[in-house]
């Protein structure tokens, strides 16, 4: 039982520092009372004088398996980038301890900055196993964060997933690229059985499974149907990357007779209220209407979208259709920090160049709504994200005596445009204090950082070997990308392309 005292409670953009300070009673991981007079004998007191009490942030789209690769790659388009990050090479198979430690690297960044929940669309090279799933889930259990975990794998050959490529690769690679993954649908579904039976609802419900088809062009109809059935049976979010890149729009033109990948996803039965449509950049009005009709959520990753040159999502067109928007950092080599404050700020900035009419630009309140409520909608959390009785006690306490809030002019705008995470003094998940007094209470951070460095040093050779193995493919991938870039796809989501480099 805990009592947070004398905090300024966040109740949306109208929250004012002149409001009365209030107390929050927390019992059994939930908020049971909020108000100026709330008290309870024997409760452990957390003094929040001078602090803002904010619902914890949500990182709604993330891939933990490359947490150790921040800063590893230059900026590259997604299709080339993925050659380096996820080739199904045996040399890249992690040990369970390696997977555990690297998962915790990002958890440390998130908990320190007030992120209380994450959706991990985890891909595993060369393929998932029960031991590796256990290692990742155990990391989430041990550090105290709330997490959804999915297995982001494809069951189609590489050449089936990308336009033009089959004709462009060197002849000696053609058979390999035309072969389906050795670890196919049956093995993947067994891994889902393990994930769900062992971890779905573990740690008092803090850990839950999710389903992932990676992307509609990366799975067979049978596997897509099996994943959708899992999502419905267990009430899981279903992660699906759609139209992140121009190359993917060109794929629809070349391979689907002009239909978009949003329509392919719908034909596969994957668009529903369970769906987290990730990126949704190269979509048209018809695609957005369909996403809205099916009740799906969109996960927006504006920093990753710039790092990989993917493009600018149509934020206002999406919000105008009342499609819930959640925010994500995406993976730690495509951000490369795991900092949701930076993601929020980018969301608040990038769309200002999307339309001349400044009345359509995102407000700070809208961005915060995406960051918290949108994230919980994506996670299918019904009772998390507000400071009210009955809600889970997932909270961040921010010191208002920091430069970010000095002087305090507008709380919502300063949260979005000034805060970097450095004002967070305490993070609580399900009533457990997981970060306070500048340390994560659940982990030995210095020891884990040292171990992560040692593991990375031991892995350097394997990463170089993997890069060397895929190097002969680079010219073909570049040519594929350039062909797609030159094809008319009836829209533009890039900027600065009109008059040459800017
Ligand atoms: Zn992703």
Image (cartoon, rainbow, N blue to C red):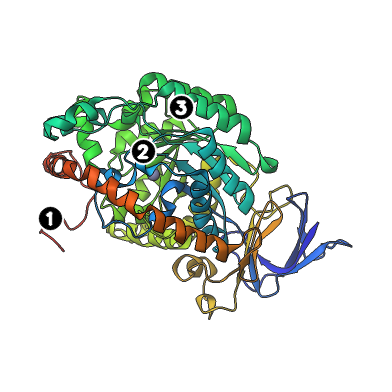
Picture quadrant where residue 209 is located = top right
Residue depth check, mark 3 versus mark 1: number of the one nearer the observer = 3
Between discs 2 and 3, the one toward the N terminus? 2
Residue 493, image x, y percentages:
24, 48
Relative height, residue 188 to residue 386 (above, below): above
Question: Which circle marks residue 188 in the picture?
Answer: 3
Picture quadrant where residue 278 is located = top left
Which residue lies at the image location 42% right of the left edge and 60% below the top edge?
337
Picture quadrant where residue 138 is located = top right
Which residue lies at the image location 51% right of the left edge and 79% below the top edge?
403
Find ligand 1 in the image and state its quadrant.
top left
Q: Is residue 335 left or right of residue 105?
A: left
Res 231 visible: no
Identify the element where label 2 is drawn. helix
Q: Is residue 432 left or right of residue 43?
A: left
Q: Mark 2 and mark 3: span between their CA atoms?
A: 17 Å
* Category of crowding for the residue at label 1, using alpha-carbon neighbours closer than 10 angstroms: few (below 14), some (14–19), many (at least 20): few
Residue 329, image x, y percentages:
43, 53
Question: Which circle marks residue 498 in the picture?
Answer: 1
């Amino acid at each position: 039982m805990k009592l947070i005292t004398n905090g300024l409670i966040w109740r949306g953009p109208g929250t004012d520092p002149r409001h009365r300070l209030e107390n929050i009673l927390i019992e059994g991981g939930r908020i049971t009372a909020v108000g100026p007079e709330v008290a309870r004998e024997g409760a452990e007191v957390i003094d929040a004088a001078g602090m803002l009490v904010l619902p914890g942030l949500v990182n709604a789209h993330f891939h933990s398996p490359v947490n150790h690769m921040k800063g590893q790659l230059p900026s590259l388009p997604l299709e080339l980038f993925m050659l380096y990050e996820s080739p199904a090479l045996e040399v890249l198979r992690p040990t369970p301890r390696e997977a555990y430690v690297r998962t915790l690297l990002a958890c440390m960044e998130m908990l320190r900055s007030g992120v209380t929940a994450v959706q991990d669309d985890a891909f595993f090279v060369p393929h998932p196993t029960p031991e590796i799933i256990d290692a990742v889930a155990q990391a989430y259990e041990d550090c105290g964060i709330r997490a959804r975990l999915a297995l982001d794998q494809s069951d189609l050959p590489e050449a089936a997933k990308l336009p033009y490529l089959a004709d462009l690769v060197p002849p000696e690679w053609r058979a390999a690229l035309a072969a389906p993954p050795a670890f196919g649908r049956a093995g993947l579904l067994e891994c889902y059985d393990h994930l769900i039976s062992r971890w779905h609802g573990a740690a008092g419900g803090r850990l839950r499974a999710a389903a992932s088809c990676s992307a509609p062009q990366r799975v067979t109809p049978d596997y897509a149907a099996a994943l959708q059935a899992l999502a419905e049976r267990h009430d899981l979010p279903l992660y699906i990357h759609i139209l992140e890149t121009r190359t993917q729009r060109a794929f629809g033109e070349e391979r689907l007779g002009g239909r978009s990948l949003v329509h392919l996803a719908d034909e596969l039965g994957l668009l529903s209220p369970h769906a987290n449509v990730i990126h949704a950049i190269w979509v048209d009005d018809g695609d957005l209407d369909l996403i809205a009709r099916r009740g799906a959520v969109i996960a927006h990753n504006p920093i990753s979208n710039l790092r990989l040159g993917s493009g600018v999502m149509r934020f206002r067109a999406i919000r105008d259709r009342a499609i819930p928007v959640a925010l994500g950092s995406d993976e730690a080599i495509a951000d490369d920090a795991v900092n949701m404050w930076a993601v929020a700020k980018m969301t608040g900035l990038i769309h200002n160049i999307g339309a001349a009419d400044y009345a359509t630009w995102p407000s700070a309140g809208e961005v915060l709504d995406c960051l918290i409520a949108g994230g919980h909608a994506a996670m299918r959390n019904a009772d998390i994200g507000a400071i009210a009785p009955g809600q889970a006690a997932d909270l961040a306490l921010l010191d208002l005596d920091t430069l970010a809030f000095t002087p305090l002019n507008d709380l919502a705008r300063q949260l979005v445009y000034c805060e970097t995470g450095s004002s967070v003094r305490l993070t609580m998940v399900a009533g457990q204090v997981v970060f306070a007094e500048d340390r994560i209470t659940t982990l030995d951070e210095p020891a884990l950082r040292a171990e992560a460095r040692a593991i990375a040093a031991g892995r350097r050779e394997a990463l170089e070997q993997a890069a060397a193995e895929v190097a002969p493919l680079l010219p073909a991938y570049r040519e594929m990308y350039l062909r797609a870039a030159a094809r008319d796809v009836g829209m533009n989501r890039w900027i600065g392309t009109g008059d040459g480099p800017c």
